[in-house]
Image (cartoon, rainbow, N blue to C red):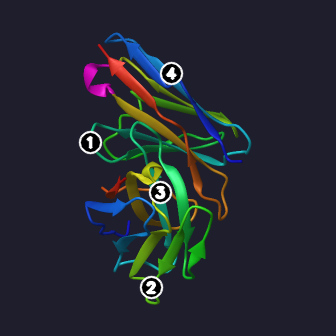
Amino acid sequence: GAVVSQHPSWVICKSGTSVKIECRSLDFQATTMFWYRQFPKQSLMLMATSNEGSKATYEQGVEKDKFLINHASLTLSTLTVTSAHPEDSSFYICSASRGGSYGYTFGSGTRLTVV
Amino acid sequence: DAKTTQPNSMESNEEEPVHLPCNHSTISGTDYIHWYRQLPSQGPEYVIHGLTSNVNNRMASLAIAEDRKSSTLILHRATLRDAAVYYCILTPLNTPLVFGKGTRLSVIA
């Protein structure tokens, strides 16, 4: 159990366009979802925390107008990278929590390349 | 967030036990000790977590020092598939995981 599906697994987009990444908890309801990004040879950096039905909480230095997060249901959160630029190219990973003493389940990640 | 200290890298022979250390001298009473691992180009995978008592599951064991200032992740028989970056993270439950640099484990056949 506790599977998180992330889609797409990779995407290439042109500079200036927007890209949406989906994160779904398949077999549990996720009270909270988290979004991370990871640059090559670096660790994961927390971008934001989203709770179903409320606004996301962004980490310092993360532009909320550029990285739009929507957590419309207990099984789906989306991250939209707006007006993408080459420096936004990264590995984006979502994570979901069932709450309580359960661990966190991560998606398989989305590799975004902006050309 | 309470800080953890892990070796940058470790090496193990296949089918031998591996002990991955983590120091966390500033741990607070509500901090759980979480271990996750990440294979190349994949999202992190949950390994184990605990609060005060040692924990065992099908993947690994977690040995927690009595003063909780350090812990050790034990892989009982390393396989090539265990080669990954292992992260030791302190956080209360239901708060975001903040990743450090972790320990890169290499497994030699």
> Who comes first in sequence, dot 3 or dot 2?
3
Label 4–label 3 contact, CB within 8 A: no
Where is residue A48 drawn, in percent x and y?
Answer: 46, 43
Q: CA distance from mark 3 to mark 2?
A: 19 Å
Question: Mark 1 sits on what residue?
Answer: A41
Question: Mark 4 sits on what residue?
Answer: A20
Please tell me whether mark 2 sits on a helix, a strand or a loop: loop
Residue type at numbered disc 3: Tyr
Please tell me whether mark 4 sits on a helix, a strand or a loop: strand
State left or right for residue B19 relative to residue A24.
left
The tag on residue B36 is 3
| Chain designation of label 1 | A
Question: Mark 2 sits on what residue?
Answer: B65
> Who comes first in sequence, dot 4 or dot 1?
4
Q: Residue at x 34, y 69 (%)?
A: B4
Where is residue B82 drawn, in percent x and y?
Answer: 45, 53
Q: Looking at the picture, does residue A103 appear above or below residue B67?
A: above
Please tell me whether mark 1 sits on a helix, a strand or a loop: loop
Magenta segment: A84-89
- Badge 1 local density, few (<14 within 10 Å), some, or many (20+)? few
| Chain designation of label 2 | B
Where is residue A105 drawn, in percent x and y?
Answer: 58, 48
